[in-house]
Image: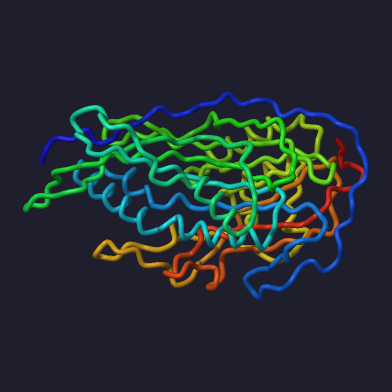
Amino acid sequence: MKRLVPLAALALLAVACQDDRLAGPTSTATPTPDAVLASRGDDGYRLPPGGPGLRVMTYNIYLGTDLGPIMAATTEAEFLGAAFLAYAELQQSNFPARAGRIAKQIEEVQPDVVGLQEVAVWSVSAPYDPTQPPLVPFAVQYDFLQILLDSLKAHHLHYASPSSVWTSDVAAPVPTAFDDQGDPTAFALVRFQDRDAILVRNGVRATDPRHGVYTAYIPLDMLGTQTGLYRGWCSILATVDGKSFRFVDSHLEAENADINYLQAQELAGLLQNVRDPVIWVGDFNSDANSGAPSYQVALAAGFTDLWAIAHPGDPGLTNGPNDGVGYLDASGVLVPWPRLVFNQRIDLVLLRDGGRKPHPVYAGIFGNQRDDRTRSGLWPSDHAAVGMVFDLPNQFARWR
């Protein structure tokens, strides 16, 4: 087998964190109407579109493949095999089709602001000689953000992304042809860029975009190439019906609880001096139902878990032990999960607003029902989305 450079680690973006301090006058908020919730059965609730009240959503839309086997590879052969299967899964997990179903979930909520995680960009340089630097420029194959915005437009929904953050950025050679002995003879260099992004509905004012990559991260040694798993946050000052609030979207580390905790502490510290109402959404990878440490960090920083107000005692499960929207069988074909198995609540919507709590709060879970799947049976994501309708507490709503 030709000797390979096993991983091309590209420059990781590290943006300095900024303080999110803003001030403004106070006023009153419009009350939320009664009965905006429709039952969705045992697995959650639906929010009908339209109606007054601030509408927000958080959704981890799944990056498209399982990178775990690549990171765990200890030999060149293991690495190439894992990269080959990961790229095959990416193709079959079919984000353009899943984006149509994700857009359908967003259509149900009609959110003013959405926090998205794992908004990947996948690019390819081919042909590629693993013994040489890339000679062919990368061409974007899947830009999850643009694909989703186009899908939303197809549903007559008009959103823009005023703030995002780039986090992990790596590339790996993927075999594209083999000889009679099964050794690779041709390669493509496939690049993965992770990103979190905020969407705002047309008509929502979004100013002062900010973002940062967490100081705490997981260093990786992948067959001698040094890289890392990075996570980040992004935020905007959003104004809906004249009322302004700081909206923060974040994705905390999933692979290491200590790093997860340090990241939660870092963001809580950055937000501690914000004087506007703060809505913090995202994939916390910290189970609220078990009172996990990072969840406790947010509560200690003055944030209120709005799901617990809307559905006290309801576990509101949003994620489980199975990665992805299916599994690769022995022949490398992606088989969709017959059902989503959830055992934790890690996709959260939190509010801090001067110690006051909104009432009422209406909340629903989306993307976890069989009719939410694509025509081929793929789930929109391996996470459920969370959508909410509420008003900022009257005494602390700020007008601009």
Q: Is residue 174 left or right of residue 235?
A: left
Q: Quadrant of the N terminus?
A: top left
Residue 53 to residue 222: above or below: below
Image quadrant where residue 10 sits = top left
Residue 105 to residue 203: above or below: below
Residue 258 picture location, percent across and down:
53, 39
Extreme bottom residue here? 41
Q: Is residue 220 left or right of residue 166?
A: left
Image quadrant where residue 237 sits = top right
Q: Quadrant of the C terminus?
A: top right
Q: Nearer the viewer, residue 108 or 57?
A: 108
Display colour scheme: rainbow
Residue 74 picture location, percent across and down:
25, 42
Q: Nearer the viewer, residue 52 or 139?
A: 139
Residue 112 picture location, percent across and down:
72, 50
* Residue depicted at 61% across the width and 63% down the height: 366
* Residue depicted at 29% across the width and 65% down the height: 329
Q: Nearer the viewer, residue 123 or 328?
A: 123
Image quadrant where residue 38 sits = bottom right
